[in-house]
Image (cartoon, rainbow, N blue to C red):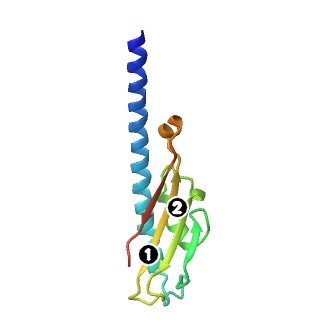
Amino acid sequence: MVEGAVVLAVLTLFVFSGMELGMVVMRCNSLGEGSRRAARAAIVRRKQASQLGALGPQTLACSAADSNAVAQAINGTLATTDPTSVQIQVAWLDGDNDVDDRVQVTLQYQHQMIVPAALGWPCCCLRCAGPLG
């Protein structure tokens, strides 16, 4: 009975750790896809985008639950993630939003881990920087 309790505790820790790792990888991938979509939304709304409404060159900081064009672009990509917990930052690196200027999108999410929280370890922060376009 003692051996069973020890083995069951270790097996349970491995199972929940595997599930936690899968959740972290899935959220990291969804943040990566979201940053690509947000960068695309920022790129097509440069200075010449009169019908869509221009973005930039000032830095945009918002959450994924907001109603702006960048937040709406990533709505469908945040699997199992609360949109109010995802912070978005869009920065125009060259100081302007002309056609050949670069834009960087950063998504940040504070992931509450199940297994380390049960053991008293701190949570981790997932951060994904999007492509430069």
Q: Nearer the viewer, mark 1 or mark 2?
A: 1
Judge the density around disc 2: few (<14), some (14-19), many (≥20) Cα neighbours within 10 Å.
some
- Whether 32 is drawn above or below 60: the answer is above
Q: Residue at x 43, y 34 (%)?
A: 16
Q: Residue 104: which disc? A: 1
Q: Which residue is mark 2?
A: 75
Report the amino acid beneath label 2.
Asn
Which one is earlier in the sequence, the residue at label 1 or at label 2? 2
Image quarter of residue 93: bottom left
Quarter of the rendering occupied by the C terminus: bottom left
Q: Residue at x 51, y 48 (%)?
A: 123
Secondary structure at numbered mark 2: helix
Q: Nearer the viewer, residue 86 or 120?
A: 120
Q: Residue at x 40, y 61 (%)?
A: 32
- Whether 84 is drawn above or below 106: the answer is above
Q: Nearer the viewer, residue 109 or 42?
A: 109
Image quarter of residue 23: top left
Tell me if 54 is positioned left or right of 98 in this view. right
Report the amino acid beneath label 1.
Gln
Residue 18 position within the rendered picture, expressed as x and y whole percent measured from the top left: 38, 37
Residue 132 position within the rendered picture, expressed as x and y whole percent measured from the top left: 38, 76
Considering every residue shown, the one lying at the far top of the view is: 1
Q: Residue at x 48, y 90 (%)?
A: 48
Residue 76 position within the rendered picture, expressed as x and y whole percent measured from the top left: 49, 59
Secondary structure at numbered mark 1: strand
Judge the density around disc 1: few (<14), some (14-19), many (≥20) Cα neighbours within 10 Å.
many
